[in-house]
Structure formats: structure tokens, C-alpha cells
Amino acid sequence: MYCNKCGKELPAESLFCPYCGEKQAFLGNDNTFTIGSNKGESIQSTQTNDKTKANSVADEIIANLKMVGLAILLCTLYLGVFRICHINDTKHITSFSGYGTSCYDEVDMRYYETDWEKIYNKIKCKKDEQILQRQIQDQQWAKSSPEMRKKLEAIRDGAPGSELINVSDEELIRDAKKKASENLEYMISLVNDRRDSRFRDDFINHLKYSILVSLALTIFGRYLIKGIKWVAANKT
């Protein structure tokens, strides 16, 4: 038999070490450790304590998994309510009259003109300017020789800035209506795409925050309640 502290050899079943004074424990025939100062009291060296600890850890893991499941349920409920509240904000519009009814619409997004009459008036003004410019040029070139006028007119006809002079008003109206229709389709498509993308970004942000808050309310809340109960039970 050797001392539990200093390691020196001791007489069998010694209660104290004569060298360092440490209490001694020895293994009896019943596989129990007996402390020398209390022969009648024994600490059972069995697997009971290990099993109890293992069961406690398993119970703690199961409890936390339940809290995670509860957090997922809370997060799902919150996101479901969030989706319902924004169901009208993500509807696709088919005409520009529905613009501005969603929280994801901008204050003003009329980057393109959708009124064909305004487009026509703008083109008509441009045509009138070209006609006026042609008249001024004709007056200036009137004193030139016929050969020089032909050369100048050939250069002028091929140059930009005179493409609308020979276009009729009916063609201008048709082109204006076509341009307005194309602009309207593009604007509607742009509004619908922006509604989808902004709702998706908003949903992802709310998903992140809802996960963090749900986990904090469940797992952290559980340990907080356990701590409060422990303090109340051990309060002197």
C-alpha cells in the first residue's frame, strides 16, 4: 500500500500517512473505497454516477433540440404573417394605373413617356425645326451657283438632322403610339421585377432577424428561467 499523496509505502490499511499525514483510502473486498477517518461511510465506485451524468447531458441536449424546434415554429409563423401582410405589395400590375399601390414602388418611376400624344408633339416639334432649318439653308444657298447648290443639297440630304422632313404626320402618329406602347410594357415589367426583388431582399432580412430572435427567446429564455428557479431554490 502506498500513500495517496506522497507515494511512500505504508503498512496495510493505514488510516494516515506517517510521513505527510494524508488520509488514506483503500479498495475493500466489496469494491468500495473507504476513507480512513470514516470507516462506516463508503463512496460506492459504481457506474451510477456516470450514468446519471450521461442521462443529464442527454436530457439537456433533447431539451435544447426542443427549443430549436420551437424557434423554427415561431420563425415560420412570423414569416407566414409577414408574407400575408405583403401579399398585395408583390402583385404584378398589368397597367400603370396600379403603380404606387405597393410599399416597394418608388416615389416616381416615369423615366419613359407613355403618352403617345406627348411623344408625337415632341417628334412634330423636331420635324418643324428641321423644316425651318431647311428653309433657312435654301435662302442662304439661293445666291449660289446651281452646281454648288446641288453639291450642298447632296451633302445635306445624307447628313443627320433632316430625316423627319419627308415623313407624314400619319407615320409620326403611328410611330408615337408604338413607342408609347413599348415604353408602357417596359415600365410595367420594370415595376414588377423591382417589386419581386425588393420583397425578396426584405424577406431574407426578416428571415435572419426572426431566426436570431426566436433562438434567443427559446434557448436563452430557457436557461434564464432555470437560473431564476435555481436562485429562488438556493436563496438563503
Image (tube, helix red, strand yellow):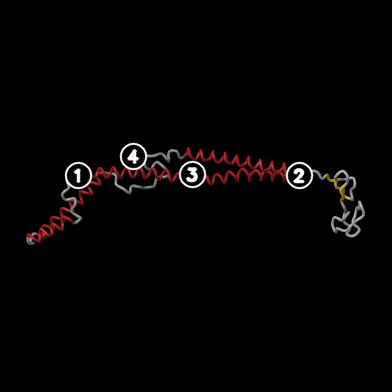
Q: Position of residue 122 (x, y in %)?
A: 23, 49
Q: Secondary structure at mark 2?
A: helix
Can you say whether 143 is above or below 167 in the image? below
Write down the residue under mark 2.
50
Write down the residue under mark 3.
203
Q: Around disc 3, counting alpha carbons within 10 Å, would you say few (fewer than 14), some (14 to 19), or many (20 or more)?
A: some
- Picture quadrant where residue 68 is located: top right
Q: Around disc 1, counting alpha carbons within 10 Å, would you say few (fewer than 14), some (14 to 19), or many (20 or more)?
A: few
Write down the residue under mark 4.
95
Q: Residue at x 63, y 44 (%)?
A: 219
Q: Secondary structure at mark 1?
A: helix
Amino acid bearing label 2 = Asp
Q: Residue at x 57, y 45 (%)?
A: 213
Residue sitting nearer the eye, 151 or 100: 151
| Lower position in the chain sequence, tag 1 or tag 2 | 2
C-alpha separation, residue under disc 2 versus residue under disc 3: 47 Å
Which is closer to the viewer, label 1 or label 4?
A: 1
Image mark for residue 89: none
